[in-house]
Amino acid sequence: QVQLVESGGGSVQTRGSLRLSCAVSGYTYVRGWFRQAPEKEREWVASITTAFGTPYYADSVKGRFTISQDNAKTTLYLQMNSLRPEDTAMYYCVATRRAPRTVDTASEYDYWGQGTQVTVSS
């Protein structure tokens, strides 16, 4: 069983920064982040392979966000810089225990955290 607990959300102004954390318990093959804004589709943000730390990013966040994990692989991070109002959303930590066919598909992830809100004001 995998448990995911997010923290670190909050409110920030445009061009500000936030770091999200996700405490991960249990084995995972890939872990990552999705987000969902009100009345919008759920959107993949970034993923990372647990064993090798290989990162993958959505085009919308590439160059601004960095996904990483601690050496013990018990905490997943999402460093978010140069934030924009369109980054406002509930952010969810996700994980799967198998190799996903694609890292950007929500249905490939079996485990989801409760979410943490990020609000960026202009």
Image (cartoon, rainbow, N blue to C red):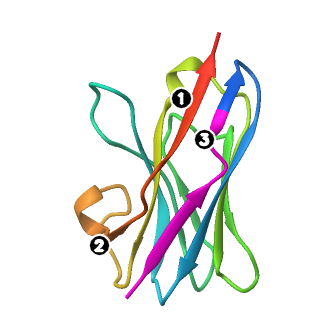
Identified at 73% across, 28% down, the residue is: 82
Say which mark, if any, is on residue 77: none
Query: The residue under label 2 is which amino acid type?
Result: Asp
Query: The residue under label 3 is which amino acid type?
Result: Lys
| Picture coordinates of residue 38, whole percent (x, y) | 33, 27
Real-space Cα distance between discs 2 and 3?
25 Å
Q: Which residue is mark 3?
A: 62
Q: Earlier in the sequence, mark 2 or mark 1?
A: 1
Label 3: element kind? loop
| Picture coordinates of residue 94, whole percent (x, y) | 42, 64
Q: Which residue is mark 2?
A: 110
Residue at the left extreme, as displayed: 107
Query: The residue under label 1 is which amino acid type?
Result: Asp
The overriding secondary structure of the stretch rendered in magenta is strand
Label 1: element kind? helix
Identified at 32% across, 64% down, the residue is: 102
Label 2: element kind? loop
Which mark is nearer the camera, 1 or 3? 1
Q: Residues within 10 Å of mark 2 (few under 14, many from 20)?
A: few
**Which quarter of the figure is the C terminus placed in?**
top right
Is 17 in the magenta?
Answer: no
Residue stretch in magenta? 1-10
| Picture coordinates of residue 23, whole percent (x, y) | 60, 71
Q: Quadrant of residue 29?
A: bottom left
Q: Which residue is mark 1?
A: 87
Real-space Cα distance between discs 2 and 1?
24 Å
